[in-house]
Amino acid sequence: MGIFGTLVGGTLGFLVGGPLGMVLGGALGSNLSRDTQSFGGRMHGQTRTMPQSAQDLQLVFALALTSLAAKVAKADGRVTKDEIQTFDAFLSQSLGLSSEDRQIAAKVFNQARDSQTPIGEFTKQIRSIFRAQPQRLRDIVSILLAVALADGHLHPAEEQLIQKIAWDFGLDQAEYQSCKAAFAAAHGEPQVSPYEVLGVSANASDEEVRRAHRKLVREYHPDTLQAKGLPEDFLEFATEKMAAINDAWSHIKKERGL
């Protein structure tokens, strides 16, 4: 069963407040058990407003990604049928989510899309939850860019909002460009610099480039991602990211004669 599917019947291991809690509560409604109906409330005599286990972190990652994807899709003023189909296809083909998971994700997507809560409230909560795992914040930005590029075009309003999300998360310009360049390269854009993919300057030393490549390879190894709370369903995106990282490293090695 996929990560969203674990919610059927109210199998939620923690109470999440804030905008994510409101979105999840609105999406699941009567599926929530009595213990989890009041997000941010009390559970077994104890207030629990932060993830407590790997499964909790996986759920929050999926919830955060879907909620922000809905906001990005609406960035140009409306959410089109094509955008919804593109997101569903991305969940199915690139992330490997089941039909059941995608049905629940669609409810979360619709709730977040229609929410009047400013996106800054979402990013503030998500950054707080993943403050000890900043690489997961970069993963969210990377996947949002992958979704936005899935139709072959990155709308200026979508990119502007994804940039805001990145800045809210505390990413710098080099980190954002690395997230963007990896998926732009994967979609065949010819002007993508391999140095941007690795997040380094073209003037970086050979050793600096090597370190950047090794760091990214470690970060996107499936075992690393799963151990740090990325849902198994979401590991497919790492394959595309790794391909871009290794391709960039190959280009740089050839260019420098390494």
Image (tube, rainbow, N blue to C red):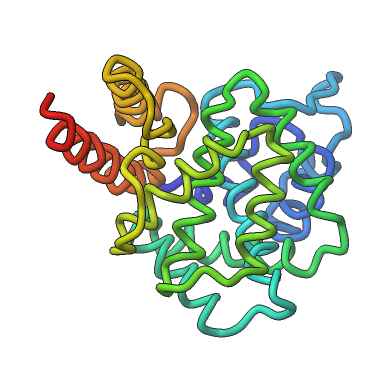
Measured as percent of width and height from the top left, residue 235 is found at 35, 41
Q: Quadrant of the C terminus?
A: top left
One can see residue 233 in this view = yes
Measured as percent of width and height from the top left, residue 244 is found at 28, 45
Residue projecting furthest to the front = 203
User: Which residue is depicted at the point 44% across and 57% down?
Assistant: 146
Residue projecting furthest to the bottom = 81
Depth check, front residue: 234 or 152: 152
User: Which residue is depicted at the point 30% across and 56% down?
Assistant: 186
Measured as percent of width and height from the top left, residue 116 is found at 87, 63
How many tags in the picture?
0
Query: In which image quadrant can residue 109 be found?
Result: bottom right
Depth check, front residue: 168 or 112: 168
One can see residue 107 in this view = no
User: Which residue is depicted at the point 87% across and 28% down?
Assistant: 42
Q: Is residue 2 left or right of residue 70?
A: left
Q: Is residue 72 left or right of residue 181?
A: right
Measured as percent of width and height from the top left, residue 192 is found at 36, 53
User: Which residue is depicted at the point 84% across and 42% down?
Assistant: 18
Query: In which image quadrant can residue 15 be found?
Result: top right
